[in-house]
Image (tube, rainbow, N blue to C red):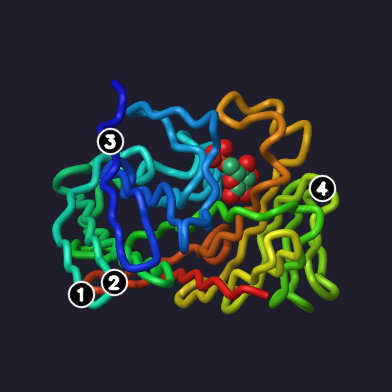
């Protein structure tokens, strides 16, 4: 079944499109320039993940810690979320989405939880996802806000903020340590053991994307490069130079465990600076 059209939010300088399906921020433009990347080959069908914007990976990341969970990146991005709030004030619009164990028990079976997602659209994009444990037993999850960023040419960007951080290289399966800025010269799929501020300097588009995160332990940097892009049916063969994923999350051995009554929030913000 084809998805309903996304909600369109317009503020002073920005326009965003957000699907209730997946609570998926699909696009965000500032002064008419796209900041989030969207694939022209994305599929818009229930049961399939969108390719672009900001998928929510929950309650597991990729194939999960066991390495054998499906669907990839968990069920949140292919679930119908409920819009529970819409506030407009002075140049910022906030959408509030909720996903609950009562409505979607299959997502994290056996647990009682509520996920609340606040999307603030304005001159910056601010995302805040809160998982609350309302049950009587602990549960664990992985989580990532899997932002696809638009870049002029991924081969020319510099990603700052990760110097000295250790990471798992998912392409080679080796653990490494970052020296200097991250640059993209081949298929790149890395889980860094650090989150915080990451700055993507883009000389082609003449801008810096300043990414601020809170509540995350990991930064994931992903670009599929030529062969992997060619192998994905929902990713155009020539689209990979124009995108870069800089994701914030708590994955692998940084998965979160919530005791009864506890809640945890992951925040991800993007600000654009022209250079
Ligand atoms: C990244 C992962 O976050 O997402 C990659 O690190 C993965 O391994 C990529 O290929 C895309 O995943 P998917 O399920 O949306 O094709």
| Of callouts 2 and 3, the N-terminal one | 3
Q: Which residue is mark 3?
A: 5
Q: Which residue is mark 1?
A: 89
Q: Which residue is mark 4?
A: 172
Q: Nearer the viewer, mark 4 or mark 2?
A: 2
Counting other residues with Cα less than 10 Å from the Cα at mark 2, is it few (<14), some (14-19), or many (20 or more)? many
Q: Position of residue 155 (x, y in %)?
A: 81, 53
SS assignment at label 2: strand
Q: Position of residue 141 (x, y in %)?
A: 42, 57
- Asked if the residues shown at circle 2 and circle 3 are in contact, with their CB atoms under 8 angstroms apart, the answer is no
The span from disc 4 to disc 2 (Cα, nearest Å) is 42 Å
- Asked if the residues shown at circle 4 and circle 3 are in contact, with their CB atoms under 8 angstroms apart, the answer is no
SS assignment at label 4: loop
| Of callouts 1 and 4, the N-terminal one | 1
Q: Is residue 80 above or below residue 61?
A: above
Is residue 57 visible in the rendered structure shown here? no
Q: Position of residue 188 (x, y in %)?
A: 75, 50
- Asked if the residues shown at circle 1 and circle 2 are in contact, with their CB atoms under 8 angstroms apart, the answer is yes
Residue at image position (46%, 57%) is: 29
Residue at image position (25%, 48%) is: 110
SS assignment at label 1: strand
Query: Is the shortest distance between ligand 1 and the CB of mark 3 under 8 Å?
Result: no
Q: Is residue 236 above or below residue 95?
A: above
- The image quadrant where one finds the C terminus is bottom right
Residue at image position (26%, 47%) is: 7
Counting other residues with Cα less than 10 Å from the Cα at mark 1, is it few (<14), some (14-19), or many (20 or more)? few
| Of callouts 1 and 3, the N-terminal one | 3
Q: Which numbered tag is attached to residue 92?
A: 2
- Asked if the residues shown at circle 4 and circle 2 are in contact, with their CB atoms under 8 angstroms apart, the answer is no
| Of callouts 4 and 3, the N-terminal one | 3
Q: Nearer the viewer, residue 171 or 225?
A: 225
Q: Nearer the viewer, residue 77 or 53?
A: 53
């Amino acid at each position: 079944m084809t998805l309903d059209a996304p909600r369109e939010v317009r503020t002073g300088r920005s326009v965003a499109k957000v699907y209730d399906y997946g609570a998926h921020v699909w696009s965000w433009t500032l002064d008419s320039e796209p900041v989030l990347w969207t694939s022209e080959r994305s599929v818009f069908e229930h049961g399939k993940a969108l390719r672009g914007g900001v998928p929510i990976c929950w309650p597991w990341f990729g194939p999960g810690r066991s390495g054998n969970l499906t669907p990839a990146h968990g069920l949140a991005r292919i679930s119908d979320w409920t819009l529970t709030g819409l506030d407009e004030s002075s140049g910022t619009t906030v959408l509030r989405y909720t996903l609950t164990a009562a409505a979607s028990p299959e997502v994290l079976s056996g647990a009682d939880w509520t996920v609340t997602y606040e999307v603030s659209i304005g001159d910056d994009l601010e995302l805040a996802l809160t998982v609350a444990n309302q049950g009587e037993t602990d549960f664990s999850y992985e989580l990532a806000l899997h932002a696809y960023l638009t870049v002029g040419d991924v081969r020319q960007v510099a990603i700052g903020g990760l110097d000295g951080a250790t990471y798992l290289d998912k392409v080679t399966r080796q653990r490494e340590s970052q020296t200097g800025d991250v640059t993209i010269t081949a298929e790149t799929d890395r889980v860094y053991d650090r989150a915080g501020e990451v700055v993507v300097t883009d000389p082609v588009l003449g801008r810096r994307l300043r990414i601020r995160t809170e509540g995350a332990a990991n930064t994931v940097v992903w670009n599929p490069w030529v062969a992997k892009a060619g192998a994905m049916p929902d990713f155009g063969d020539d689209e990979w130079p124009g995108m870069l994923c800089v994701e914030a999350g708590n994955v692998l051995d940084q998965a979160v465990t919530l005791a009864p009554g506890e809640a945890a929030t992951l925040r991800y913000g993007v600000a654009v600076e022209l250079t």
